[in-house]
Image (spheres, rainbow, N blue to C red):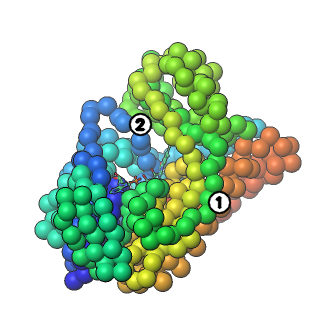
Amino acid sequence: MKHYVINGGGMVGASAALALATHGERVTLIDAQPEAQTSDEWDLRISSVNDNHWQWLLSLGIGDDLNHKQLPYQRLSVTTIAGTQLSFTAADAGAEQLGVMVENNNLQAALWKCCQRHAAIEFKAPAQVTDFDLPNQRLTLDDGEQLNYDVLIGADGANSAVARAAAIGYRGWDYGQRCLLANVTLEQPFEAETWEVFRPKGPYALLPLTSNTACLIDYRSAAEINSISSDADTLISELTKTFGDTIGDFQLQRYASFPLQRKHALEYHKGHSLILMGDAAHTIHPLAGQGVNLGFADVRSWLDCGQDVKRYQQQRQQQNARMMRAMDLVNVSFRSSSKPINWLLRGGFSIIERTALKSLLLGSAMQR
Ligand SMILES: Cc1cc2nc3c(=O)[nH]c(=O)nc-3n(C[C@H](O)[C@H](O)[C@H](O)COP(=O)(O)OP(=O)(O)OC[C@H]3O[C@@H](n4cnc5c(N)ncnc54)[C@H](O)[C@@H]3O)c2cc1C
């Protein structure tokens, strides 16, 4: 039995702790923050988790600890600014659902409860590592406690302290865009379907939450998002311009915006006793909701690779790079107002609609 220390108990770190403990390893899970708080209302941070990973998470035993803020979805549609539409349904994929929209806090809190109950997991939160003695595989926590480990996992997000301690560099850039999220109460019934429209300045999308609430998502340049969200009245007026024709009148509940960056670790491991997972290894444009799905795939791959650092890096670095390039291509080409690109996209969309390519695309999006 190995002793794993996982720095970072986000959705990826906490699922890694549970998966490793279920696999027979001993785990210490450290997070700088106290337990995630959930309330009756939906938080702004929501993730679409594909059905393959959702079933894996349920197999780890989290089902009874989830609250109501999780919604299975059966259909997704994407529309270009030229009006060409592509829809994906669970039936196309031969599945009952494409995946689940889940509140990040809800999923993290359920994972933490399962970790806290597991005899093989020791939980330390809020706590921080003050010294990484990597050659001796030893950490010191802020209360002075020292921990020896066989493997240290950095699952501590995009600003990973573990990657910094191991001097692991990144390749990437700031997209210069922000993603604005606004939860709203709608005043008239609306179709409970997730959709996304691509336009030159960036996509906008709607995520239904309940029968009368939805999350409105708007991607634009950082300067424009800062300007339209400078106060609630300006924001309501801008959201009405973008979404009003489709959803009618609404009341704004809460909103926030997030910067978008692309970062990919140059190495996923240091020696045989340190690896990175989740956003600590890769952050990706969220327009297709792939970020945490890639993190879950990291965890599962680590176990499938027999906990072999080289095989893990080879497998995950390639697959994550492929997904990052695909997201960049979508981000650039679907935003384009160039006529030839739009013509190609329109042709591409109708070919996809008519052929088996659609089930192929769906299959790969729903895989690990
Ligand atoms: C606007 C937006 C929408 C998104 N939508 C989707 C989506 O629909 N689907 C999807 O798959 N992905 C989505 N993502 C991406 C997804 O949110 C991330 O990929 C995911 O949160 C990464 O999880 P993680 O556990 O790796 O890292 P994080 O969520 O960043 O968690 C890191 C954890 O480490 C802890 N920590 C940090 N530093 C330290 C430290 N020094 N010591 C101890 N603990 C530390 C933090 O407290 C936290 O608990 C979206 C991202 C954005 C910005």
Q: Are marks 2 and 1 in contact (CB under 8 Å)?
A: no
Kindly identify the amino acid type of the residue bearing the numbered disc 1.
Ala
**Label 2 SS:** loop
Expressed as whole percent of the image width and height from the top left, the position of residue 154 reads 39, 66
Please count the marks in the image.
Answer: 2
Task: Please name the residue that numbered disc 1 is placed on.
Answer: 326
Q: Residue at x 40, y 83 (%)?
A: 272
Q: Residue at x 45, y 78 (%)?
A: 270
What is the residue that sits farthest to the right in this orientation?
A: 340
Q: Quadrant of residue 17?
A: bottom left
Residue 44's tag is 2
Kindly identify the amino acid type of the residue bearing the numbered disc 2.
Leu
Q: Is residue 124 above or below residue 201?
A: below
Q: Is residue 48 above or below residue 178?
A: below
State which tag comes first along the sequence, 2 or 1: 2
Q: Residue at x 86, y 48 (%)?
A: 340
Q: Residue at x 48, y 83 (%)?
A: 311
Expressed as whole percent of the image width and height from the top left, the position of residue 339 reads 86, 43
Pick the residue in front: 318 or 268.
268
**Label 1 SS:** helix
Q: Quadrant of residue 27?
A: bottom left
Q: Quadrant of residue 252?
A: top left
Q: On the picture, is 294 further left or further right than 150?
A: right
Q: Residues within 10 Å of mark 2 (few under 14, many from 20)?
A: many
Pick the residue in front: 71 or 34.
34
Expressed as whole percent of the image width and height from the top left, the position of residue 142 reads 24, 58
Q: Is residue 239 shown to the viewer in this render?
A: no
Q: Is residue 265 shown to the viewer in this render?
A: yes
Q: CA distance from mark 2 to mark 1?
A: 26 Å
